[in-house]
């Protein structure tokens, strides 16, 4: 497959692995051939990177701000060397961050490196129930701060006012692109953005209630060197390149088939993943829960999980998912950082052991968990295929022994996601 240009059009920097896959999914839906790199690509990957869009997946969401900035700038430098025409900084549709960072700081650094003075910030993803009105982020019908995200173990979101949240992270003036302007269309948005810039605004939170609003925002921001937001904001970007005669239409979502065993690994403590684990258990399917406290005292949890998977009749779920109260209890005993690291390392080791047992298809729930699993499996490049559920596509890794993976943000997917993803990774899309 070839495109009408020699260089990628859009360069993307994502602050976690599932967020990168979510963004890549959106671009594929728009007709852009998209490759996702786990970290900044090495020289050995150059031949596999012929694409309209390249998404570099970092694990910077919860890093100290200075480290997140350093990694993001390195990714930007790599993308600029490839000639990308526009840069997209992708973060979670629930604006996961703290007063210390990292969305504002990374956006600042990218703007400075691009010699730009303004960008838009819009995490809206209406298809998954994330909307913004008057600068306040809603998850379905609840304010972000009442949606369960206030209990997030790493980035608790206790304020739904994104202007206020972002202003705490940057010295630039943060403004609001209100829905009044967005509803009037592309020209009205461009006029309002010009007005905000004239007032000294360097970043503007954008209201959005529907996919139509995101298409409007994408078209209005075609000339901005940098855009920031959730994957939803990328909806309108492919059409910008198409209108400019830079993007040809291909079937970009077809993936090679991958045969072998399959497994589901879940580390997220989100409401959605808890529901997906419950659905699996209610169906009577084999599952094993791993206990961080057992890991902490050196019990052979990984070995037990591998033996369980090998002896089970059917596909297994191995999970550390738990309720917010139970997560807090473990964190109080072990510390949040240590508890998370123990689970991520164990699930990565389990994934590696399962591959040695012949497993080739992995459904993984949770951004941190997905990062640990792809690292343990040695995955560096992913070809992005068709959507499984909003924000989650099927993917296949590059290399001589490809793996099929569905990497899911903890908050995404319907209650039957695990079964649906296994079916699609196996090539059964009926």
Image: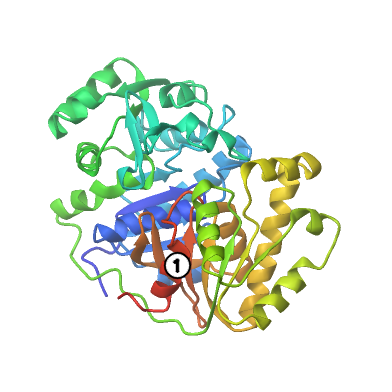
Say which of 417 and 101 sits in front: 417
Residue 430 higher or lower than 279, as above or below: below
Query: Residue 333, image x and y in percent?
Result: 80, 42
Task: Count neighbours of disc 1 (C-alpha within 10 A) and say few if under 14, some if 14 to 19, many if 20 or more.
Answer: many
In front: 404, or 287?
287
The quadrant holding residue 253 is: bottom left
Between 39 and 180, the residue placed more toward the observer is: 180
Question: Residue drawn at (77%, 66%), measured in percent from left and top?
Answer: 301
Q: Residue at x 69, y 56 (%)?
A: 343
Dividing the picture into quadrants, the one containing residue 207 is: top left
Residue shown at the point (44%, 49%) measured from the top left: 13
**Residue behind mark 1:** 382
Up the image or down, 241 lies above or below 429; here it is: above
- Identify the residue at horizontal 65%, vertical 65% (top origin): 348
Q: Is residue 170 left or right of residue 389?
A: right
In x, y percent, where is residue 347?
A: 66, 63
Q: Is residue 35 left or right of residue 352?
A: left
Q: How is the image coloured?
A: rainbow
| Element assignment for label 1 | strand
């Amino acid at each position: 497959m070839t495109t009408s240009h020699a260089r990628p059009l859009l360069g993307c920097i994502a602050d976690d692995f599932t967020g990168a896959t979510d963004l890549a999914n959106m671009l594929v839906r728009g007709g852009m051939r998209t490759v996702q790199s786990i970290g900044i690509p090495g020289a050995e990957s150059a031949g596999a990177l012929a694409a309209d869009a390249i998404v570099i997946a970092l694990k910077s969401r919860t890093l100290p701000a200075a480290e997140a900035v350093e990694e993001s700038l390195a990714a930007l430098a790599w993308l600029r060397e490839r000639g990308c025409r526009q840069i997209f900084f992708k973060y979670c549709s629930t604006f996961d961050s703290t007063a210390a960072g990292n969305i504002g700081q990374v956006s600042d650094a990218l703007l400075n490196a691009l010699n730009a003075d303004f960008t838009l910030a819009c995490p809206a993803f209406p298809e998954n129930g994330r909307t913004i009105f008057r600068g306040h982020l809603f998850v379905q019908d609840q304010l972000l701060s009442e949606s369960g995200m206030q209990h997030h173990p790493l980035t608790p979101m206790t304020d739904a006012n994104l202007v206020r949240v972002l202003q705490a992270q940057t010295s630039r003036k943060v403004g609001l692109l209100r829905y009044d302007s967005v509803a009037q269309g592309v020209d009205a948005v461009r006029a309002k953005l010009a007005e905000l810039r004239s007032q000294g605004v360097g970043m503007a939170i954008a209201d959005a209630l529907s996919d139509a609003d995101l298409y409007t925002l994408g078209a209005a921001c075609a000339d901005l060197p940098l855009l920031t937001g959730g994957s939803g904001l990328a909806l309108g970007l492919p059409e910008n390149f198409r209108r400019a005669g830079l993007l040809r239409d291909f079937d970009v979502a077809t993936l090679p088939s991958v045969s072998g065993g399959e497994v589901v690994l879940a580390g997220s403590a989100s409401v959605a993943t808890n529901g997906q684990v419950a659905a699996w258990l209610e169906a009577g399917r084999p599952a094993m829960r791993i206990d961080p406290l057992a890991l902490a005292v050196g019990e052979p949890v990984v070995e037990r999980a591998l033996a369980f998977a090998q002896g089970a009749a059917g596909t297994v779920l191995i999970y550390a998912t738990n309720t917010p109260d139970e997560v807090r209890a473990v964190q109080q005993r072990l510390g949040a950082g240590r508890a998370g690291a123990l689970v991520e390392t164990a699930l990565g080791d389990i994934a590696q052991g399962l591959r040695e047992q012949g497993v080739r298809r992995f459904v993984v729930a949770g951004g941190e968990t997905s990062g640990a699993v792809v690292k343990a499996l040695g995955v560096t490049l992913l070809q992005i295929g068709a959507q499984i559920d909003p924000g989650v596509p099927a993917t296949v890794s590059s290399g001589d022994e490809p793996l099929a993976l569905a990497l899911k943000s903890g908050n995404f997917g319907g209650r039957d996601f695990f079964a649906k993803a296994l079916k699609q990774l196996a090539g059964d899309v009926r």
